[in-house]
Amino acid sequence: MPARPHPVAVADWSPRATLLGYTTLTYAISWSLWSVWALSETGATLTGTVLFILGGLGPFGASVVLVRASCRDVRAWLRGIFEARIALRYYALALALPVALLLGAAVIHIVLFDGVVTPDLLPGIIEYPLFLGFVVLFGGGLEEPGWRGYLLPELQEAYSPLTAGLLVGVVWAGWHLPLVFIPGTIQHTLPLGLYLLQLVELSVLLTWLANRVGGSVLPAMLLHAGGNALLNYYPVGGVSGATSPLGLGLLVAMLTLAVVALVLTAGTSLGTDRPAR
């Protein structure tokens, strides 16, 4: 009898196999937990919140599993992607860019579309660090070790950073799809096409940021969290205005301009040719 072929070890996976394997594992972890949350009666209870948060940790969890399966040192990998000794300007950029995009969209909303500023609908500015910290620790920020800390470097072994960033963006957008169909999530209220386009474009920006700091995901976590938390502070209607077709459309337009300017400036290398800590 012919010998059975041995399965290819994770360490020997091609980038295409890594993309497929990582996507499958991440989706399986997150979608199963979100399905239990959506189909059960836990709702907004503590159990439901825990299931939702654990589902959001799918990208991080899948990366840890695959790093271990490839016989790499998980601690060394974690130290690399959480390297904090990087230039302060990248932390500042990660915090400031979402603010700039939000204000740019709001100005256009007010000037060209007669939007009305609604300060009474906005949280106090002192609450923003709390929103930001929560999203970093329990929300979208903790996706970044998976997307930009594991999958992106693996794909950049075979693809240009721009292509790799776009591929990660497509997988990232697809990962969110179940939330679009679950009532009660913010994704359920968003115009689907604009939302998915926003994620793919944002992935390009986060790719450049991660590459510029040598693979650390900390600035990407801050930018990701800031983009989520700042929706509460959209000057025209708060979060409802930011997630309306017009508000989200303007935010995506501002992001598009930023990404186009970035690609024209940095090219397809997106910072890999000049990493700077």
Image (tube, grey):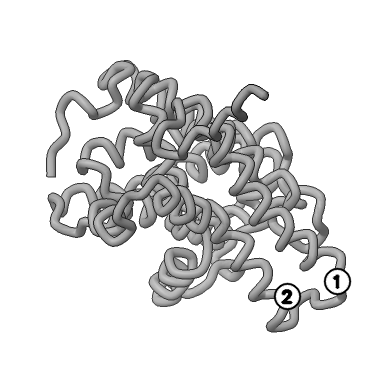
The answer to whether residue 117 is seen in the rendering is: yes
Residue visible at 51% across and 58% down in the picture: 61
Q: Quadrant of the C terminus?
A: top left
- Looking at the image, is mark 1 or mark 2 earlier in the sequence? 1
* Horizontal and vertical percent position of residue 96: 31, 51
Residue visible at 36% across and 56% down in the picture: 222
- At label 2, counting other C-alpha atoms closer than 10 Å, the crowd grade (few under 14, some 14-19, many 20 or more) is some
Front position in the image: 47 or 186:
47
* Horizontal and vertical percent position of residue 234: 54, 55
Residue identified by numbered label 2: 48
Element under label 1? loop
Amino acid type, label 2: Gly
* Horizontal and vertical percent position of residue 195: 64, 39
Q: Relative to 203, is 96 on the left or the right?
A: left
Residue visible at 38% across and 55% down in the picture: 221
Front position in the image: 248 or 274:
274
**In 3D space, how far apart are the residues under numbered discs 1 and 2 (Cα atoms)?**
8 Å
Residue identified by numbered label 1: 40
* Horizontal and vertical percent position of residue 50: 64, 75
